[in-house]
Image (tube, grey):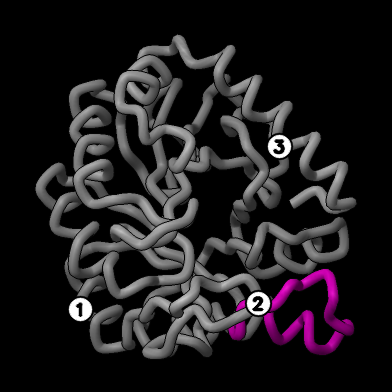
Amino acid sequence: MPAWQADILMYHSISDAPGPTSIAPEVFKAQMQALAASGLPVVTPDALANPPAPRVVIISFDDGFEDFADTAWPILRDHNFTPIVYLPSGRMGRSDSWAGGHVPPRPLMGWDKVAALAEEGVCFGAHSISHPDLTTLDPEALEDEITGPGQDITARLDQPIRHFAPPYGASNPDIRARVARNYDTSVGTRLGVAKAGDDMHDLPRLEMFYFTDIARWKAHLAGRGGPYLAARKLMRNVRAAIRGKPW
């Protein structure tokens, strides 16, 4: 396979809410303007089977927050960027009131809005049914949480769902094997740039909260972000070791 790399950007909410899973709308707009100016091709995970360039960018969103439709999508659409949004299918129309969710909870899109976005070209992936830590589930519940969302979303949108993201990035070899039987790719929360030869069901992403400094983001896009990314990865690995979990 030819060498390639993919910067898979990870977003959650585009809002002024506090915390690392929210990016202010003006910051997001500036990040997308810088990406457009870079000239790097923006693709969906479908393109990883045959990338159109040696370096590509994928814009991903977890959870399907309502502000994706109201705030993020108009900005993306202006740049002709097609993102992928990973949906917890049993939570749509509700909120992120799961373990570790935001306080106060933030609303998720309803299915009518999801269907309208699909008609406009937004790509959707699966993010479990109920947003649990998959590593804590018994085999039957785990199988349901992996296979169920793809079936749910396909039934709603009448399109195949080929991509998955485990909640919290929580995964292990058994989970990845089960995901691989149902989806073409899976992304987590492991920090890094995806490259040819990586496990397609354990792809790293770039947490965009680390790139709210637009000068730093432009440096990364220009290929000068290696030292900063290495420092961030080291800090995350130290925190993970303290927690005793790799996510």
Mark 1 is on which residue type?
Ala
Secondary element type, mark 3: helix
Measured as percent of width and height from the top left, residue 3 is found at: 57, 20
Circle 3 residue: 236
Q: Is residue 53 above or below residue 111?
A: above
How far across and down, in percent of the image, does residue 207 sit?
51, 42
Residue at horizontal 62 percent and vertical 28 percent from the top = 232
Image quadrant where one finds the N terminus: top right
Mark toward the start of the polypeptide (3 vs 2): 2
The residue lying toward the viewer, choosing from 163 and 210, is 210
Q: Are discs 3 and 2 less than 8 Å apart at CB? A: no
Mark 3 nearby-residue class (10 Å; few <14, some 14–19, many ≥20): some
Q: CA distance from mark 3 to mark 1?
A: 37 Å
Amino acid type, residue under disc 3 in the picture:
Arg
Q: Which residue is identified by label 1? A: 116
Q: Which residue is mark 2?
A: 99
Q: Position of residue 96 (x, y in %)?
A: 49, 78
| Residue range of the region highlighted in magenta in the rendering | 129-145
Asked if the magenta segment contains residue 187, the reply would be no
Q: Is residue 143 left or right of residue 222?
A: right
Residue 31 placement, left or right of 132 = left
Question: In which quadrant of the rendered view does residue 157 lie?
Answer: bottom left
